[in-house]
Image (cartoon, rainbow, N blue to C red):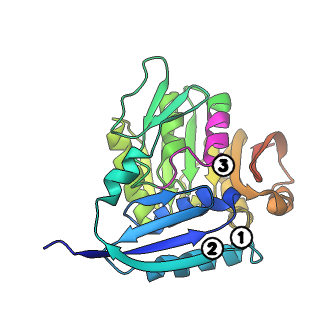
Amino acid sequence: MENKTYNELTITLPSVMVEFVADYVANIFNDAIEMGSDSIIIRSENDISYVKEGVEALVTQLDSSMQITFKMEVKKNEDWIANYQNSIDPIEVGEFYIYPSWYEGKEDKINIKIDPALAFGSGHHATTASCLEFVEKYTKADNSLLDVGCGSGILALGANKLGAKVDLCDTDPLSVESAKENFTLNNAVYNAIWEGSANKAQGEYDMVIANIIADVLKMISKDIKKATRKGGIILLSGILDKKEEIVLKAFDDLDLMDRKVQDEWVTLVYQKI
């Protein structure tokens, strides 16, 4: 019997942080997430207090001074997933066209099908979009590539559609499953995928991508470098501009080739010397 009520958590926060925090929430929460200009709404018939606790922990890591409020309510049931789907539009990033499964692809674009209601990373966030631009710019057809902290797998999917042979990993088992599902959704094939990080990589890659927060990039910097062949490309993102120096210091033994800032988020491209 369907529940007559559901739990709704509204998170109000600075607009620049909405999509990044929503991506994090989608990583730990499997139902639909709705994003406003300065809010995130989570709905479920089950207990969702753990989402609030998780976001509080994330904010402490990112910026403890951030103005953020939480409002928990019990509401009458309705089909919020259908309402959410109606609010999602496809986006274009360079030659990539990212669209949910209830839309059609475009013949003149590199199509990536992602359902943002169910997946982490749908191309809408500045870091994902910037990474996709650099994936298009630097990926070559015969490259081997590792996507560290793959989330939905969107970056590896983009590289794979450009002809790269891709491996993926994430410390969150939900993300690993999400990435597998999205490769299936796109009729795409990965070489290997595992739960864990770059330290489990076998051999070296032409390109390593890590769209994670700055503190984690610093923590796994040696593993990322070890997994990259000499002359290979390292693409780093998820870096708040105020935390950029942490990453610059951790990778200062490499050649900084490219940099992009969008909505206070920094993306860096290095070459291993």
Q: CA distance from mark 2 to mark 3?
A: 17 Å
| Residue located 36% across and 52% down the image | 83
| Residue located 47% across and 58% down the image | 34
> For the residue carrying disc 3, how many other residues have a C-alpha within 10 Å: few (<14), some (14-19), or many (20+)?
many
- What label does residue 127 carry, if any? 3
- The x and y percentages for residue 46 are 32, 77
For marks 2 and 3 on the same chain, the one whose residue lies earlier in the sequence: 2
Which image quarter: residue 47? bottom left
The number of numbered discs placed on residues in the rendered structure image is: 3
Image quadrant occupied by the N terminus:
bottom left
> For the residue carrying disc 1, how many other residues have a C-alpha within 10 Å: few (<14), some (14-19), or many (20+)?
some
- The x and y percentages for residue 255 are 84, 43
Any magenta on residue 125?
A: yes
147 to the left or right of 188: right
Q: Residue furthest top?
A: 108
Which image quarter: residue 14? bottom right
Residues 205 and 269: in front is 269
64 to the left or right of 142: right
Q: Contact, CB < 8 Å: mark 1 with mark 2?
A: yes
Q: CA distance from mark 1 to mark 3?
A: 15 Å
Instruction: Name which residue type carries label 1.
Output: Leu
- What label does residue 62 carry, if any? 1
| SS of the residue under disc 3 | helix
| SS of the residue under disc 2 | helix
Instruction: Name which residue type carries label 3.
Output: Thr
Magenta segment main secondary structure: helix
Q: Tell me: residue 246, above or below residue 156.
A: below
Can residue 220 be seen in the rendering of this structure?
yes
- What label does residue 58 carry, if any? 2
Residues 83 and 121: in front is 83
Magenta region: 120-135
